[in-house]
Image: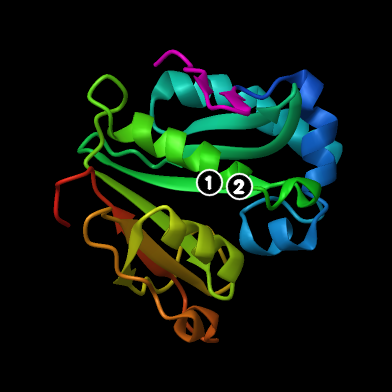
Amino acid sequence: MEPVTLRTERLELSLPTEADVDAIFRACQDPGIQRYTPVPVPYERSHAEAFIARIPADWAAGRNLTWGIHEADVLVGTIGLYRMDGDGNGEIGFWMAPKSRGGGRLLEAANEVIRWGFAPDGLGLTRIEWRAVVGNLASAKVARSLGFRYEGLMRRPRRFQAPRRRLGRSPSHDRRPDAAALASAGRLNTPLTRHPPGVAG
């Protein structure tokens, strides 16, 4: 698959380049990103370089698609559709640099990625999941705002040692997960899912 550039009113979603290495390296020093996303810890500059280097091959394989979120040519986060299985299913993931949180940038980027993911002239997906480590309430708030609905608990997630949860999206059948449940300890994974407009989960 050839990389696709997406644009919103303020943002450009495009492949990260070598010019973005320092921005990724700085952002991934954030304790929240290290706790709630599968980045190496400690995170070194070489990790950012390797991350950027593998993205074109990931696009070519068509299973994991990552964009850099750029505002005024500055990388402020990353977002992607991952683990696409060829049967219309995928998973959205994202992080924002600490100084760029708030202001609706992530919602703006995620809505455009989801729109393209479901579009017949995009990926034509029928289901998009979002997953998170238990306690990641900020990300859960974003997922709810995007129209994802709570599905349940996944135990023993493969990518994380920390407890995780999962959610999914169906715009016409939104079910908001309980904040206390998302914060609970000892649970391993929570799915939220979302389906295209008019398609029930």
Would you say 78 lies left or right of 132 here? right
Question: In the image, is 18 to the left or to the right of 189?
Answer: right
Instruction: In this rendered view, identify the residue nearer to me: 195 or 86.
Output: 195
Answer whether residue 189 is visible to the viewer in this image.
yes
* Crowding at mark 1 (Cα within 10 Å: few <14, some 14-19, many 20+): some
Is residue 32 rendered to the left or right of residue 136? Answer: right
Q: Amino acid at mark 1?
A: Leu
Does residue 64 appear to the left or right of 169 in the view shown? right
Residue 41, placed above or below residue 133: above
| Magenta-colored stretch includes residue 46 | no
- Residue range of the region highlighted in magenta in the rendering: 1-14
* 6 within the magenta span: yes
Q: Quadrant of the N terminus?
A: top left
Q: Is mark 2 in CB contact (under 8 Å) with mark 1?
A: yes
Q: Residue, x 62% and y 56% (percent of image)? A: 37
Kind of element beneath mark 1? helix
Residue at 81% x, 35% y is 23
Q: Position of residue 200 (x, y in %)?
A: 14, 55
- Which circle marks residue 107 in the picture? 1
Query: Where's residue 147, x and y in %?
Result: 36, 56
Q: Is residue 136 visible?
A: no
Residue 144 placement: quadrant = bottom left
Q: Which residue was labeled with disc 2?
A: 104
Q: Residue at x 45, y 84 (%)?
A: 181
Between 201 and 44, the residue placed more toward the observer is 201
x, y percent for residue 45: 84, 37
The amino acid at mark 2 is Gly
Label 2 crowd (10 A; few <14 / some 14-19 / many >=20): few
